[in-house]
Amino acid sequence: MENDVNILVDVLLPWTLRLIMFGMGMLLTVRDFIRLKDYPRAVVAGLGGQLLLLPLVGFALAWLWQLSPELAIGLVILAACPGGTTSNLVSHLARGDVPLSITLTAVNSFIVVLTIPLFAVLAMDLFIGEPADVPMPYASVIWSVFNYTIIPVALGMAVRALFPALVRRIRRPYDIFAAFAFVFIVLIIVWDSRENLLLYFVEVGSVTLALNLVMTALGLAIGAAMFIGTRQTLTLGIEIGVQNTVLGMAVAGAVLHGVRGLDGSIMLMPSAIYGLIMFLPTLAIIRYGRRHLSDPGREYYSED
């Protein structure tokens, strides 16, 4: 069983993540980054909520719940992850501002290459409670996150730029494939880790649900306070409240496994359990958006 889990976490999980991020890259063009100037307040609020507020809330909840070091560090790593393609899809279903969602996810995916290692080492120093006699492998973590996010996103963008007609034909089937791959890898890891899952579900399930609810509410409150529009407000709630659980599992379960004696199979539990419950609160946002907002009349993908 241990060997099976190692194969899943060390091999299948990273490649699934790369496939998902490659698909996100096929959504993007350079115009999506230039679009930052169209809604600067929403972008600043979204990035601030994702990059700073979310990890801080993760630290606070881990402390309030008195989690074990592995679970606390795993929760912080989850909180430091960007939204991923899941948040883009939820924004689409809720009739939010999809270009804003894609832009926030794309920009954040580039920045977390530096912020995830930073918050990981801060969490280790805080929750392990002993001097850092084992150095943090910064270069390895930075390269791993870069390898899981920026490289496949850049390749996806390149494929779209070089073969736009091909991408238009395959992007919807590819999205379906990526969605099934995401669900598959989460369920398989959950099944193989079911003993740990059952052991930690009550403890971790409550704190991950709290993380999702608190951050979704804060995202909506920030948007409302800034008067940036209902679509943009819903999108902020989704982007700040929904995390890339596959990236969280990959970093916690594979990249940081064994660092300072930590068990990656336990550290990935917050991300795995979060992946099972994060859609419950978003259903309320989707229902609200579809009941109160008109169809924006544009595709999930920006056109070439």
Image (spheres, rainbow, N blue to C red):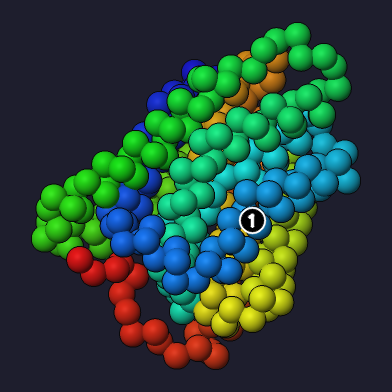
> In the image shown, does 269 or 143 lie closer to the viewer?
143
> In the image shown, does 35 or 294 lie closer to the viewer?
35
* Residue 127 vertical placement versus 219 (above, below): above
Task: Say what secondary structure mark 1 lies in.
Answer: helix
**With 102 as the anchor, is 203 left or right in this view?**
right
Q: Position of residue 128 (x, y in %)?
A: 81, 23
**With 236 as the anchor, is 158 left or right in this view?**
left
Residue lying furthest front in this view? 37
Q: Quarter of the image holding residue 12?
A: top left
The quadrant of the picture occupied by the C terminus is: bottom left
- Tell me the residue that label 1 is attached to: 48
Examine the rendering and report whether any part of residue 26 can be seen. Answer: yes
Q: Position of residue 38 (x, y in %)?
A: 44, 71
Q: Residue at x 68, y 35 (%)?
A: 119
Q: Residue at x 23, y 69 (%)?
A: 303
Q: Position of residue 226 (x, y in %)?
A: 66, 76
Name the amino acid type tagged 1: Gly
Q: Quarter of the image holding residue 234?
A: bottom right
* Residue 104 vertical placement versus 200 (above, below): below
